Amino acid sequence: MSEKMVQANGVELCTESFGNPNNPTLLLNAGATLSMVWWHRDFCRKLAEAGRYVIRYDYRDTGRSITYEPGQIHYSWDDLTDDVIGVLDAYEVDRAHLFGWSMGGMITQLVGLKYPERAITITIMSSKPFAPTDAPSVENEEFLSHFAKAAMLDWTNETAVIDYTVEGWRFTSAGSKHPFDEISIRELATEDVKRANNLPSANNHALLSGGDRYSNRLGEINIPTLVIHGTADPMVNYQNGVTLAKEIPDATLLTLEGTAHELHRNDWDTIIDAVIKHT
């Protein structure tokens, strides 16, 4: 395991790797506003122990990567897609397996369309078909009301920000068969807050635009695809996973009964087993 700053697509991004670089590379793309810490370190270690060289990274405006002023986005969907390739180039990886969660699943779709020669397989979890006008959108009104409170939050008050983040995850995990893992979520939220260059900048992801030419092209993805989706996802309805698996040729759907919009520890073994078999 080693964290390092890399130059990717003309910007500085923070990355971290796990495992043996001689093993097949698995690059992780997180959800909107999420730094790489939300790919739990133990989850990454388990993937590495199963024989994958795992790379996670901070998106622009998250963690220790480049940040911009809140409300002033300076990049597009194309840029985030190109950042993936920039990270692979920085690690001197020609082709990799890609695993995208939520917004990361949409970015993974774009890599499959724009750079198919760089992806060996793709895994899309808790995501939806790419549509530039509504991404990264959610389908939970309670969470949207919670998200609106960000404008009034005192971002210099670490305790308040951590509490706000934990409550957001409580909405995200609503309806799950799993108990809300507040201890783990609070630990990750604390790490996220303490390491971020400018935490409120992450909300810039809500301003993403571009990528119109990639709409309605799932049928062109000619890369082995695994779709993972929980039936109790309150943020991105399960039907989106069904649609992805139907429209991407020969895609496989792994249904997580009762699971919400989360990477819950109780699902790790199921997800890791499926990803290792797929890759």
Image (cartoon, helix red, strand yellow):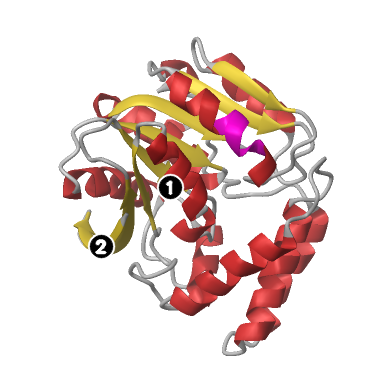
Which residue is more in the foreground, 264 or 166?
264
Question: Is residue 3 at least partly visible in the picture?
Answer: yes
| Residue on which the image places disc 1 | 210
Q: Quick check: is 270 in the magenta stretch?
A: yes
| Disc 1 element | loop
> Residue 246: which quarter of the image?
top right
Measuring 82% from the left and 40% from the top, which residue is drawn there?
177
State the image quarter where residue 10 is shown: bottom left
Identify the amino acid type marked 2: Lys
Q: Is residue 35 above or below residue 153?
A: above
Residue ranking furthest to the left: 92
Tell me which residue sits at (18%, 33%) in the image: 94
Position of 260 relative to 171 (above/below): above
Task: Tell me, yes or no, whether the two marked residues, 1 and 2, touch with CB atoms within 8 Å.
Answer: no
Q: In terms of depth relative to the viewer, which is nearer, 85 or 6?
A: 6
Indicate the secondary structure of the residue bearing disc 2. Answer: strand
Question: Badge 1 local density, few (<14 within 10 Å), some, or many (20+)?
Answer: some
Q: CA distance from mark 1 to mark 2?
A: 29 Å
User: Measured from the top left, where is residue 196 in percent x and y?
Assistant: 45, 74
Q: Which residue is mark 2?
A: 4
Which comes before the other along the chain, label 1 or label 2? Answer: 2
Q: In the drawing, does residue 272 fall left or right of residue 61?
A: right
Q: Which residues are magenta?
A: 267-271
Q: Is residue 45 left or right of residue 114?
A: right
Q: Residue furthest front?
A: 49
How far across and how far down the image is residue 209, in percent?
A: 47, 52
The main secondary structure of the magenta stretch is helix
Q: Residue type at mark 1?
A: Gly
Q: Quadrant of the N terminus?
A: bottom left
Judged left or right of residue 162, residue 101 is left
